[in-house]
Image (cartoon, rainbow, N blue to C red):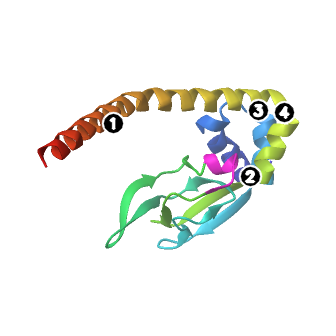
Amino acid sequence: MDMSLVQDIAILKNIPMLADFQDDQLRLLAFSAESLDYTGGQTLFDEGERADGGLVVAEGTVSLQKRTGGGFEEVDIAAPGTLLGETAMLVDTRRPCRAIAQTDVRIIRIRRALFKRMIQEYPDLARRLFDVQAQRYQTTVRALEPIGRKMAELEKIATLKGLRGSQDN
């Protein structure tokens, strides 16, 4: 087997979203994915751009940047083994930030169509993936509940203040 294919399988195996994939499934995914090379300073994708799948940083580092009033601000650095665009592997979405290669970078590109074909062929994989995503959304909802309560309290206070203000006139 090609050495870079062996390396790609090892990288993919360590990505949480792909943790339930068997070796033969990872081999198929690595074989079917594209390998892309970028030089330092090159843009991998731009903020707001349509995302057609996930990009795994195989080598090098990528600067993730959000648009601000004065240009762009770095919000994170993606090291080797990072999956960019996890959601894009499942649904049509847009890139939440731009990605610039900080060094020479090699990317394993997994198109959504390929990923969907994989999980259609392995229904047990799809079920586990769904369970993990559902659990993640439940965690997010639980984390947002206190914020929702605070917002409701603030709204109530603002309404009461508004009523008092109108009584003063």
What's the magenta region? 86-93
Position of residue 72 measured from the top left corner of the image (x, y, whole percent): 37, 68
Question: Which amino acid, by three-letter code, is at mark 2?
Answer: Arg
Which residue is disc 2 drawn over?
112
Closer to the chain start, of discs 1 and 2, is 2
Give the residue at x 87% y 37%: 121
Check disc 4 and report its element: helix, strand or loop: loop
Closer to the chain start, of discs 4 and 2, is 2
Which residue is disc 1 drawn over?
151
State the separation of the CA atoms marked 1 and 2.
37 Å
| Residue 88 highlighted magenta (yes or no) | yes
Which residue is disc 4 drawn over?
122
Which residue is disc 3 drawn over?
126
Give the residue at x 69% y 31%: 130
State the separation of the CA atoms marked 4 and 2.
15 Å
Position of residue 168 measured from the top left corner of the image (x, y, whole percent): 12, 45
How dense is the environment of label 3, judged by Cα within 10 Å: few (below 14), some, or many (20 and up)?
some
Position of residue 89 measured from the top left corner of the image (x, y, whole percent): 68, 48
